[in-house]
Image: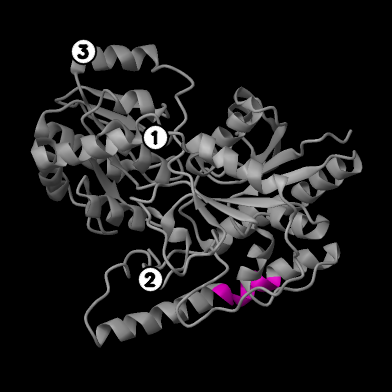
Amino acid sequence: MVTSRPKIVLAGIGTKGDLFPLVALGRELVRRGYRCDLLSNEGAEDHARSAGLGYQAVTVAQTNNMVDLWENLEGHVFPSYQPTFEYFARELARGERLAVVNLDECSASNFMCERHQLPLCRLVLAPSRFDSMSRPAWPFHQRPVWPLSLLQERALRRMYQRKDMAPPLLRRMNQLREPLGLPPLSRVAQINAWVQRQICCFPEWFGLPQPDWPSNVELAGFLLPEATAPLPAELFAFLERAGKPLVFTPGTGVVDVEGFFADALGCCEALQRPGVFLSPHYRGPGRAASVPVFHAPFVELQPLLARSALLVHHGGAGTTARALQAGVPQIIRAMAYDQPDNGSRIEALGVGEYFVPGSFRLSRLVKCARELLSSAEVKARLQDLSQKLAGSRALCAAADCVERTFAAEPRNLAREVPSRGAAQRADGVAPSGLQPALQL
């Protein structure tokens, strides 16, 4: 049945950090009277249903995102294409008017928007998603002196070009496009031609828009929905007994966590602080600890960090934002994707430390944690940024942007995608399946 408002398809696969912004946006859109479906991994149904969203699994759960590029694409991303195509065919056959919000170029929903001329918004979770020459992502974010600056510029241009012209990815995508009657791609960035609005889920003071970012960018701010559940009773009792803990999480998409938590326990013991360890893959310390330690597969960070002293984590955008919201110093042990750049931005803000991949050592962890916990300057900066996030309307701003975009006429897909200029990439976002600036 056709209605005056479109049904909004929220398309995104990945770990909890990828899905939560989509689910939060969907909850707000449902509150405004929209019908929304989430197309995602197996295992996300409870999150979708609790937000009032319809749900369809289009691929298997992603329990480990630290895998080879092609293992991720062939084992997780590309298997989602056919179920996604079938969903769109079924909904359109029923007479549904559809509009799409997705996370990246690798989403099968991009092809459906192009094939059926559907309006499309893109959620951009971190500043490093844009291939910028003005302010590139770590490790190129600091421009060296000449002539090294010229060498860096050339290296960046070559790297961006390789990502945009990646022959294996283009071949595979064109194989999937052909049965749909879509023309072959010559550049990955051509997928972005139909994106009407890119909604950045971070504030300007975290990711200042650059002159060479796409023209269709709008900053909403960190999407920080209120927690949907209180702390588990056992964790609440632990905090009441032990006091403010150091919180450690390597991210839900990391399975090799024993070394991380061995250092976490060593840090807690060295500082004589209680610890909260969060991971579905942690099997426990294997020895008696000299300080109180609590382990849980997952808890919502907002109520936990409000009662915590420090967060040590992987640098995911959502986790980074929650620490800023709580006014808690953070130490980021980044591994890949947007994490290193998020870490460098936190360090530049003066509210945490960033460990370059491969540099994580217990002695340095203890030293950094002690300095952050005792610094009056860090505390003042955290209070300032936390106040900026208090009463955030970012979710409303993102939903407003979606509504405005979908109320407008879709732009003409037949226009030619701009070519990359000497100092800008006019059309886009780096493919999510590809590795970041440096192979980490």
Q: Which residues are magenta?
A: 164-171
The image quarter in which residue 411 lies: bottom right
x then y, percent, for residue 164: 56, 74
Task: Tell me if residue 255 is in the magenta stretch.
Answer: no
The image quarter in which residue 96 lies:
top right
Amino acid type at image mark 2: Ser
Residue hosting label 2: 134
How far from the left and from the top, in percent, is residue 262? Answer: 24, 40
Q: Residue at x 63, y 50 (%)?
A: 121
- Mark 3 or mark 2, which has the lower sequence index? 2
Are circles 1 and 2 on residues that touch, CB within 8 Å?
A: no
What amino acid is found at the position of numbered circle 3 in the picture?
Arg
Q: Secondary structure at mark 2?
A: loop
Quarter of the image with the C terminus in it: bottom left
Please give the residue where the numbered disc 3 appears in the rendered image: 241
- Residue at point 44% right, 43% down? 221
Q: Amino acid at mark 1?
A: Ser
Q: CA distance from mark 1 to mark 2?
A: 37 Å
The residue closer to the viewer here, 363 or 170, is 170
Q: CA distance from mark 3 to mark 2?
A: 50 Å
Within 10 Å of disc 2 (Cα), the crowding (few <14, some 14-19, many 20+) is: some
Give the number of the disc on residue 279: 1
Res 87 visible: yes
Residue 146 % position (x, y): 23, 85
Q: Which mark is residue 69?
A: none
Front-most of 28 and 63?
28
